[in-house]
Image: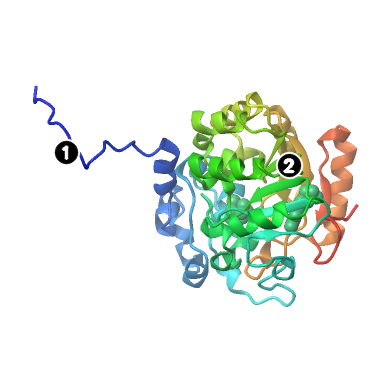
Amino acid sequence: MIPARPLPRHQAPQQPAPRWQQLWRDAVRDPAELLSLLGLEDLAARISPAAVAQFPLRVPRGFVARMRHGDASDALLRQVLPLDDEERIVPGFGLDAVGDGAARAGSGVIRKYHGRALLVATGSCAINCRYCFRRHFPYADETAARGQWSEALAIIAADDSIDEVILSGGDPLSLADGKLAELTDALARIPHIRRLRIHTRLPVVLPERVDDGLVGWLRGLPWPVTVVIHANHANEFDADVDAALMRLRDAGCLLLNQAVLLKGVNDSVDALAALCERGHHAGVLPYYLHQLDRVSGAAHFEVEDADALALHRDLAARLSGYLVPKLVREVAGDPGKRPLA
Ligand SMILES: *Cc1c(COP(=O)(O)O)cnc(C)c1O
Ligand code: SF4
């Protein structure tokens, strides 16, 4: 055996990065690699270099493993593949589809609705979803997204009509446990906050994120915590996701799901019913079914309002009332999400 050499004093032994951070870094970023993993090399001609340059491909390997091999129309693949469809310029699809530009102050706090303040806690996500407003959001202008929270905290502290803070992004759970604790320690000193909400896709796309450290942080929070996950298709759930969601429930979190209605992904009553039932199986109730935000590059995902309403009607005719999400659209200037039905 080779005797261990003592470390020089200035080199404190480094904690290895948590496993989820390693998996995060190991995400697939090369469209050619993704296609080859799935046996879909023929699709290479449909990949748009311009779309990749504007908003890179990024998808955790565990999420890729849930895609069907050899299926170009797989519902999970469609959500992340930068296709040439994105190059189409479609009137009405722009860079700030939901009026965030007008509602934010550069601080990272977005105040649109009574009682709630949304904190853009980071610009990072583990996955890049092609339909997302995030592809155009100017995170670099938001101090909170750059980890400078003092201005955002001051805005929230100064307004006692805010009783719920929503951690959003990006994906707030992409922050390390220590950063999350720093943020919630500061929020805990604001007496008018009564509820914390976390909007995150990580328990679904990188379930390893829900590790002991995260659960420990959640258990120590002084407010009831609602976690709104984001799954668009039943196939996004697997045993690892179920286990991650169970850990969140054990930590006392209420779990809701929001989905986006996406052509070619979940625009059938079968797909939507399966999503709602599969979520419930994992302890998650449906919350919102969103009509697409009209961001440029995402027009090929749009479902007409008349079709959305018909799908929602059929869904309500099929499922228990509590399994039917509210069909909504975000309209700039409205006092809340606007119901379609
Ligand atoms: C969607 C949203 C919320 C939350 O709205 P709920 O209807 O309570 O889920 C809060 N603030 C902003 C800026 C939002 O976009
Ligand atoms: S914010 Fe949500 S939908 Fe948008 S890219 Fe990140 S994980 Fe995907």
- Quarter of the rendering occupied by the N terminus: top left
Task: Please state which of residues 114 and 286 is positioned toward the viewer in this rendering.
Answer: 114
Q: Position of residue 75 (x, y in %)?
A: 62, 48
Mark 2: amino acid: Pro
Q: CA distance from mark 1 to mark 2?
A: 46 Å
Which residue is labeled 1 in the image? 8
> In this image, 71 relative to 281: left or right?
left
> In this image, 326 relative to 231: left or right?
right
> In this image, 143 relative to 301: left or right?
left
- Residue 108 visible in the shown view: yes
- Residue 199 visible in the shown view: no
> In this image, 314 relative to 269: left or right?
right
Q: Position of residue 70 (x, y in %)?
A: 50, 47
Which residue is labeled 2 in the image? 191
Q: Residue at x 21, y 42 (%)?
A: 10
Q: Is mark 1 within 8 Å of ligand 2?
A: no
Q: Secondary structure at mark 1?
A: loop
Q: Is mark 2 within 8 Å of ligand 1?
A: no
